Image (cartoon, rainbow, N blue to C red):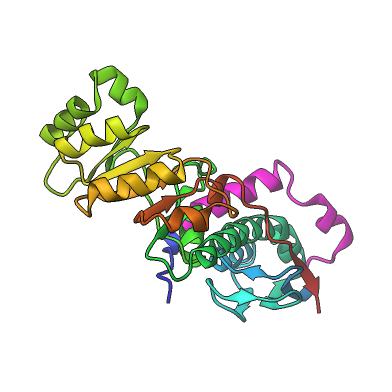
Amino acid sequence: MIAPLPDLLIEPIVRAALAEDLGRAGDITAMACIDADAQLDADFVARKAGTVAGLACARLAVLALDPNARFEAMVEDGDTIGRGTALARVSGNARALLSAERTALNLLGRLSGVATLTRAYVEAVAGTKVRVTDTRKTTPGLRALEKYAVRCGGGTNHRFGLDDAILIKDNHVAACGGVGEAIRRARAFAGHLVKVECEVDGLDQLAEALEAGPDVIMLDNFSLEHLRHAVELTAGRVVLEASGGVTLDTVRAIAATGVDVISVGALTHSASVLDIGLDAV
C-alpha cells in the first residue's frame, strides 16, 4: 500500500493547471455545444500498458469544476495495468467533465509515465540489494507529485530539496578547496539528524572522503571497474550511491558491482507520458 499524498498538497497544483487551461472566458467549446444541465458518464482508459499514478489528480480536477460529480477509481496507484484497462469512471455535469478532461489527463498521464519508467528500472535490478532512487531533476512545481509517482513505481526518493539533506557536489568541493574540507565544514554545520553526502569523481577523492566520514558517498560517472573497487575500499563503512548517465541497458551491471543505491535522473526528466484517454460510456 502506497501512502497517498494529501489532497491539501495536490489541490493547488490542479487548480493552477485548470486556471491555465480555462483562461479568461472558460471552456467556450463546451458552452457552445453542450446544454448547461447535460450529464455525462465517462471512463479514464489506458491506451498502453503501464503503472498507474496520479488518480487523485484526476479526481480533484473533476471535483473542482463539478463538486457533485462522482469519481469511482477502478484500480489503485501503483497497480500495473494492461492496454484498455479502465482506471476510473466519472459521472457528472458534461460541461464540467469535458473542461476538466485535459488537466486530469495531463497529470494522470505524466505521473503514470514516471511510475511506469521507474517500474522498468526496479524490475531490471530485481534480485540485487540495490535501491533505485530519483533526483531533483523534476518538473518545476510538480516535484512532490513526480516523487510520489516514483514510489508508485517501486522506487525510492532522494532528498526533496536543498533543505532536507546536505549534498556536496563538485562545485562545492572546488569552493572549499577539497573534498575533505567540504565534508568537515558540513559536519560542523549539520544538526544530528541531517545526513551528509559527498560526490566524488575518482578513487583519489573517494579515499579523502572516507577519511572525513560522510554518511553517503556518490560515485559520479564511475566505470564498472572503479565501482567495484570503490565497494571493496569502502567495505560497508558508508552508503555508496552510483550516479551519472544510468540507463535501462546499464543499470543491472551497475547494481552487480555491489553499490547500495543507484540514482536515476531519467525517472523524472525523461519519462514518456502514459497514453490515457477519457471515453464517454
Number of marks drawn: 0
Depth check: 119 or 213 in front? 213
Name which quarter of the figure residue 203 lies in.
top left
* Quadrant housing the C terminus: bottom right
x and y percent of residue 228 in the render?
A: 37, 49
Horizontal arrangement in the rendering, residue 40 relative to residue 146 (left or right)? right
Point 36% across, 54% down: residue: 259
Point 42% across, 77% down: residue: 1
> Is 281 part of what is drawn in magenta?
no
Horizontal arrangement in the rendering, residue 273 relative to residue 185 (left or right)? right
Q: Is residue 191 above or below residue 204?
A: below
Horizontal arrangement in the rendering, residue 207 relative to residue 19 (left or right)? left
Point 15% across, 36% down: residue: 211
Let me know if residue 38 appears in the view: no
> Is 17 part of what is drawn in magenta?
yes
Residue at the right extreme of this rendering: 33
x and y percent of residue 206 in the render?
A: 27, 36
Point 73% across, 72% down: residue: 45
The part of the chain drawn in magenta is 9-36
Q: Is residue 278 above or below residue 144?
A: below
Depth check: 55 or 260 in front? 260
Name which quarter of the figure residue 207 lies in.
top left
Let me know if residue 152 appears in the view: yes
x and y percent of residue 171 in the render?
A: 35, 23
Depth check: 53 or 9 in front? 53
Main SS, magenta residues: helix
Horizontal arrangement in the rendering, residue 110 relative to residue 163 (left or right)? right
Q: Is residue 189 above or below residue 172?
A: below
x and y percent of residue 162 in the render?
A: 33, 38
